[in-house]
Amino acid sequence: MTEDKAFDTISYTLENKTAKINLNRPEVHNAFNEVMIAELTEIFSKISKDESVRVVVLTGNGDSFCAGADLNWMKKMIHFSYQENLEDSLKLAELFYLMYSLPQPTIARVNGAAIGGGTGLVAVCDIAIASENAKLSLSEVKLGLVPACISPYVIRKVGEGRCREFFLTGERLTANRAMELGLVNQVVPLEKLDQAVQEKVNQLISSGPSAIAMCKELLRNVPGMSFDKAKTYTAEMIALMRIGDEGQEGMNAFLEKRKPKWTK
Protein backbone atom coordinates (compact mmCIF):
# COMPACT_ATOMS: atom_id res chain seq x y z
CA MET A 1 0.00 0.00 0.00
CA THR A 2 1.23 3.50 -0.78
CA GLU A 3 0.01 6.72 0.75
CA ASP A 4 0.90 10.13 -0.63
CA LYS A 5 1.28 13.46 1.12
CA ALA A 6 -0.96 14.25 4.05
CA PHE A 7 -4.10 16.14 3.11
CA ASP A 8 -6.26 18.23 5.41
CA THR A 9 -9.70 17.13 4.18
CA ILE A 10 -9.20 13.83 2.37
CA SER A 11 -7.12 10.67 2.68
CA TYR A 12 -5.65 8.73 -0.21
CA THR A 13 -4.19 5.24 -0.57
CA LEU A 14 -3.18 3.11 -3.55
CA GLU A 15 -3.31 -0.66 -3.14
CA ASN A 16 -3.70 -3.47 -5.67
CA LYS A 17 -4.18 -0.99 -8.54
CA THR A 18 -7.07 0.66 -6.68
CA ALA A 19 -6.93 4.29 -5.56
CA LYS A 20 -9.10 4.89 -2.50
CA ILE A 21 -10.09 8.45 -1.71
CA ASN A 22 -11.89 9.14 1.55
CA LEU A 23 -13.59 12.43 2.26
CA ASN A 24 -12.23 13.07 5.73
CA ARG A 25 -14.28 15.69 7.57
CA PRO A 26 -16.59 13.39 9.55
CA GLU A 27 -17.26 16.07 12.17
CA VAL A 28 -19.24 18.00 9.51
CA HIS A 29 -20.50 14.92 7.63
CA ASN A 30 -17.73 15.36 5.02
CA ALA A 31 -19.15 18.64 3.75
CA PHE A 32 -16.84 20.19 1.18
CA ASN A 33 -15.21 23.61 1.28
CA GLU A 34 -12.61 25.36 -0.83
CA VAL A 35 -9.82 23.26 0.72
CA MET A 36 -11.50 19.94 -0.08
CA ILE A 37 -12.27 21.10 -3.63
CA ALA A 38 -8.59 22.01 -4.13
CA GLU A 39 -7.36 18.73 -2.63
CA LEU A 40 -9.76 16.60 -4.66
CA THR A 41 -8.72 18.47 -7.79
CA GLU A 42 -5.06 17.82 -6.97
CA ILE A 43 -5.45 14.10 -6.35
CA PHE A 44 -7.75 13.42 -9.33
CA SER A 45 -5.38 15.36 -11.60
CA LYS A 46 -2.54 13.15 -10.41
CA ILE A 47 -4.56 9.94 -10.82
CA SER A 48 -5.55 10.87 -14.37
CA LYS A 49 -1.86 10.62 -15.37
CA ASP A 50 -1.02 7.53 -13.30
CA GLU A 51 -1.23 4.31 -15.34
CA SER A 52 -0.71 2.21 -12.22
CA VAL A 53 -4.20 3.22 -11.06
CA ARG A 54 -6.85 1.02 -12.64
CA VAL A 55 -9.91 1.91 -10.51
CA VAL A 56 -10.83 4.75 -8.15
CA VAL A 57 -13.13 4.31 -5.15
CA LEU A 58 -14.55 7.44 -3.51
CA THR A 59 -16.23 7.29 -0.10
CA GLY A 60 -16.68 9.22 3.13
CA ASN A 61 -15.24 8.63 6.59
CA GLY A 62 -17.74 8.25 9.41
CA ASP A 63 -21.46 7.79 8.94
CA SER A 64 -21.95 10.11 5.93
CA PHE A 65 -20.78 10.13 2.35
CA CYS A 66 -20.95 13.91 1.83
CA ALA A 67 -23.37 16.51 3.17
CA GLY A 68 -22.71 18.92 0.30
CA ALA A 69 -21.31 22.41 0.74
CA ASP A 70 -20.00 23.38 4.17
CA LEU A 71 -22.28 25.96 5.80
CA ASN A 72 -19.40 27.98 7.22
CA TRP A 73 -17.87 28.17 3.75
CA MET A 74 -21.23 29.26 2.33
CA LYS A 75 -21.51 31.97 5.00
CA LYS A 76 -18.29 33.50 3.70
CA MET A 77 -19.66 33.49 0.17
CA ILE A 78 -22.63 35.61 1.22
CA HIS A 79 -20.24 38.56 1.25
CA PHE A 80 -18.48 37.64 -2.00
CA SER A 81 -18.98 39.73 -5.13
CA TYR A 82 -20.42 38.16 -8.27
CA GLN A 83 -16.91 37.79 -9.72
CA GLU A 84 -15.61 36.13 -6.55
CA ASN A 85 -18.59 33.77 -6.50
CA LEU A 86 -18.02 32.95 -10.17
CA GLU A 87 -14.34 32.13 -9.64
CA ASP A 88 -15.23 29.97 -6.64
CA SER A 89 -17.98 28.12 -8.49
CA LEU A 90 -15.78 27.48 -11.52
CA LYS A 91 -13.35 25.56 -9.32
CA LEU A 92 -16.17 23.22 -8.28
CA ALA A 93 -17.37 22.89 -11.89
CA GLU A 94 -13.84 22.02 -13.01
CA LEU A 95 -13.56 19.36 -10.30
CA PHE A 96 -16.79 17.69 -11.38
CA TYR A 97 -15.68 17.60 -15.02
CA LEU A 98 -12.25 16.27 -14.04
CA MET A 99 -13.86 13.42 -12.14
CA TYR A 100 -16.41 12.74 -14.88
CA SER A 101 -13.76 12.62 -17.62
CA LEU A 102 -11.16 10.62 -15.68
CA PRO A 103 -9.68 7.84 -17.88
CA GLN A 104 -10.03 5.30 -15.08
CA PRO A 105 -13.42 4.00 -13.91
CA THR A 106 -14.73 5.50 -10.68
CA ILE A 107 -16.94 3.93 -8.02
CA ALA A 108 -18.85 5.92 -5.42
CA ARG A 109 -19.05 3.89 -2.22
CA VAL A 110 -22.09 5.63 -0.74
CA ASN A 111 -21.88 4.72 2.93
CA GLY A 112 -24.45 7.26 4.17
CA ALA A 113 -26.11 10.57 3.36
CA ALA A 114 -25.16 12.26 0.07
CA ILE A 115 -26.84 15.65 0.04
CA GLY A 116 -26.69 18.47 -2.53
CA GLY A 117 -23.19 18.49 -3.97
CA GLY A 118 -22.69 15.10 -2.32
CA THR A 119 -25.25 13.71 -4.75
CA GLY A 120 -23.25 15.47 -7.45
CA LEU A 121 -20.15 13.52 -6.43
CA VAL A 122 -22.19 10.33 -6.76
CA ALA A 123 -23.46 11.37 -10.20
CA VAL A 124 -20.02 12.10 -11.69
CA CYS A 125 -18.77 8.63 -10.72
CA ASP A 126 -19.27 5.88 -13.28
CA ILE A 127 -20.80 3.44 -10.81
CA ALA A 128 -22.46 4.05 -7.45
CA ILE A 129 -22.96 1.35 -4.83
CA ALA A 130 -24.95 2.47 -1.80
CA SER A 131 -25.75 1.05 1.59
CA GLU A 132 -29.42 0.61 2.46
CA ASN A 133 -29.23 3.45 4.97
CA ALA A 134 -27.98 6.00 2.43
CA LYS A 135 -30.08 9.05 1.61
CA LEU A 136 -29.62 11.28 -1.43
CA SER A 137 -31.06 14.70 -2.14
CA LEU A 138 -30.67 17.70 -4.39
CA SER A 139 -31.87 20.04 -1.70
CA GLU A 140 -30.44 23.33 -2.98
CA VAL A 141 -33.89 24.83 -3.58
CA LYS A 142 -34.54 24.61 0.17
CA LEU A 143 -31.75 27.17 0.58
CA GLY A 144 -32.93 29.37 -2.28
CA LEU A 145 -30.19 27.98 -4.54
CA VAL A 146 -30.01 25.56 -7.49
CA PRO A 147 -28.03 22.36 -8.21
CA ALA A 148 -26.13 24.22 -10.91
CA CYS A 149 -22.62 22.79 -11.31
CA ILE A 150 -23.80 19.22 -10.86
CA SER A 151 -26.82 19.50 -13.15
CA PRO A 152 -25.09 18.41 -16.42
CA TYR A 153 -24.09 15.11 -14.85
CA VAL A 154 -27.28 14.37 -12.93
CA ILE A 155 -29.48 15.21 -15.94
CA ARG A 156 -27.32 13.08 -18.21
CA LYS A 157 -27.43 10.18 -15.79
CA VAL A 158 -31.15 10.07 -14.99
CA GLY A 159 -32.86 12.25 -17.62
CA GLU A 160 -34.63 15.60 -17.62
CA GLY A 161 -38.06 14.23 -16.79
CA ARG A 162 -36.97 12.74 -13.48
CA CYS A 163 -34.84 15.76 -12.62
CA ARG A 164 -37.87 18.01 -13.06
CA GLU A 165 -39.32 16.29 -10.01
CA PHE A 166 -36.44 16.04 -7.54
CA PHE A 167 -34.59 19.22 -8.60
CA LEU A 168 -37.75 21.19 -7.86
CA THR A 169 -38.92 19.39 -4.73
CA GLY A 170 -35.51 18.87 -3.10
CA GLU A 171 -36.95 15.69 -1.62
CA ARG A 172 -34.88 13.10 0.23
CA LEU A 173 -34.45 9.90 -1.75
CA THR A 174 -33.90 6.51 -0.16
CA ALA A 175 -31.11 4.41 -1.61
CA ASN A 176 -33.64 2.15 -3.32
CA ARG A 177 -35.50 5.12 -4.81
CA ALA A 178 -32.19 6.51 -6.06
CA MET A 179 -31.52 3.17 -7.70
CA GLU A 180 -34.92 3.23 -9.40
CA LEU A 181 -34.04 6.67 -10.79
CA GLY A 182 -30.62 5.56 -12.00
CA LEU A 183 -28.52 7.66 -9.60
CA VAL A 184 -27.34 4.48 -7.87
CA ASN A 185 -26.47 1.16 -9.52
CA GLN A 186 -26.65 -1.21 -6.56
CA VAL A 187 -27.97 -1.16 -2.98
CA VAL A 188 -26.69 -3.53 -0.31
CA PRO A 189 -26.74 -3.79 3.49
CA LEU A 190 -24.03 -1.63 5.07
CA GLU A 191 -22.10 -4.69 6.27
CA LYS A 192 -21.88 -5.96 2.67
CA LEU A 193 -20.87 -2.64 1.11
CA ASP A 194 -17.14 -3.35 0.99
CA GLN A 195 -17.72 -6.78 -0.53
CA ALA A 196 -19.97 -5.35 -3.24
CA VAL A 197 -17.46 -2.61 -4.06
CA GLN A 198 -14.58 -5.10 -4.24
CA GLU A 199 -16.54 -7.36 -6.59
CA LYS A 200 -17.07 -4.41 -8.92
CA VAL A 201 -13.40 -3.42 -8.65
CA ASN A 202 -12.40 -6.96 -9.67
CA GLN A 203 -14.71 -6.82 -12.69
CA LEU A 204 -13.22 -3.54 -13.83
CA ILE A 205 -9.59 -4.59 -13.36
CA SER A 206 -10.19 -7.70 -15.49
CA SER A 207 -10.97 -5.46 -18.50
CA GLY A 208 -8.49 -3.67 -20.73
CA PRO A 209 -7.47 -0.30 -19.25
CA SER A 210 -7.30 1.43 -22.64
CA ALA A 211 -10.62 -0.11 -23.64
CA ILE A 212 -12.24 1.26 -20.49
CA ALA A 213 -10.79 4.72 -21.13
CA MET A 214 -12.10 4.65 -24.70
CA CYS A 215 -15.51 3.45 -23.50
CA LYS A 216 -15.66 6.50 -21.26
CA GLU A 217 -14.75 8.69 -24.22
CA LEU A 218 -17.54 7.11 -26.26
CA LEU A 219 -20.01 7.78 -23.47
CA ARG A 220 -18.93 11.44 -23.27
CA ASN A 221 -18.93 12.15 -26.99
CA VAL A 222 -21.46 9.99 -28.83
CA PRO A 223 -24.66 11.35 -27.19
CA GLY A 224 -23.92 14.81 -28.63
CA MET A 225 -23.16 13.58 -32.16
CA SER A 226 -25.36 13.24 -35.18
CA PHE A 227 -25.70 9.69 -36.48
CA ASP A 228 -23.70 10.68 -39.54
CA LYS A 229 -20.77 11.92 -37.46
CA ALA A 230 -21.03 9.02 -35.02
CA LYS A 231 -20.68 6.50 -37.86
CA THR A 232 -17.20 7.72 -38.76
CA TYR A 233 -16.11 8.42 -35.18
CA THR A 234 -17.05 4.98 -33.87
CA ALA A 235 -15.68 3.09 -36.89
CA GLU A 236 -12.34 4.88 -36.57
CA MET A 237 -12.21 4.13 -32.87
CA ILE A 238 -12.79 0.38 -33.17
CA ALA A 239 -10.34 0.15 -36.09
CA LEU A 240 -7.62 1.78 -33.97
CA MET A 241 -8.41 -0.46 -30.99
CA ARG A 242 -8.19 -3.61 -33.13
CA ILE A 243 -4.67 -2.84 -34.35
CA GLY A 244 -3.47 -1.53 -30.97
CA ASP A 245 -1.36 -3.56 -28.55
CA GLU A 246 -4.17 -4.00 -26.05
CA GLY A 247 -6.72 -5.10 -28.63
CA GLN A 248 -4.26 -7.55 -30.16
CA GLU A 249 -3.40 -8.98 -26.75
CA GLY A 250 -7.04 -9.26 -25.73
CA MET A 251 -8.12 -11.04 -28.91
CA ASN A 252 -5.12 -13.39 -28.85
CA ALA A 253 -5.70 -14.21 -25.18
CA PHE A 254 -9.33 -15.07 -25.94
CA LEU A 255 -8.37 -17.33 -28.86
CA GLU A 256 -5.61 -18.98 -26.85
CA LYS A 257 -7.92 -19.46 -23.85
CA ARG A 258 -5.69 -17.57 -21.42
CA LYS A 259 -5.96 -14.41 -19.36
CA PRO A 260 -4.69 -11.23 -20.99
CA LYS A 261 -1.48 -9.69 -19.68
CA TRP A 262 -3.19 -6.70 -18.05
CA THR A 263 -4.82 -8.95 -15.44
CA LYS A 264 -1.44 -10.05 -14.03
Image (cartoon, helix red, strand yellow):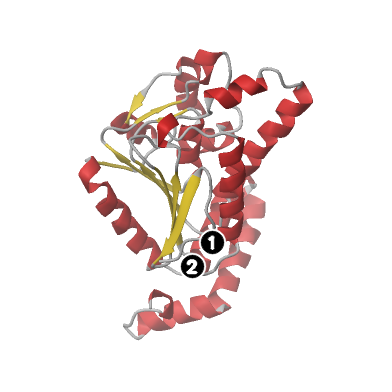
Which label sits on residue 209? 2
Image height of 70 relative to 203, above or below: above
- Residue 123 at x, y = what percent? 48, 39
In the image, is 212 to the left or to the right of 220?
left
Q: Image point 35% across, 79% down: which residue? A: 259
Q: Where the C terminus falls, by quadrant? A: bottom left
Q: Residues within 10 Å of mark 1 (few under 14, many from 20)?
A: some
Residue 47 is situated, as x and y percent measured from the top left of the image, at 55, 59
Mark on residue 213? 1
Q: Secondary structure at mark 1?
A: helix
Q: Residue at x 52, y 20 (%)?
A: 140
Residue at the spot x=33%, y=56% of the render?
200
Identified by mark 2, the residue type is: Pro
Question: At 32% across and 33% down in the image, what residue appears?
Answer: 134
Q: Nearer the viewer, residue 179 or 9?
A: 9
**Residue situated in front as seen by the camera: 30 or 161:** 30
- The amino acid at mark 1 is Ala
Mark 2 and mark 1 residues within 8 Å of each other at the beta carbon: yes
Q: How many marks overall?
A: 2
Query: Distance of mark 2 from mark 1, alpha carbons?
Result: 6 Å
The label number, if any, that marks residue 60 in the structure image: none
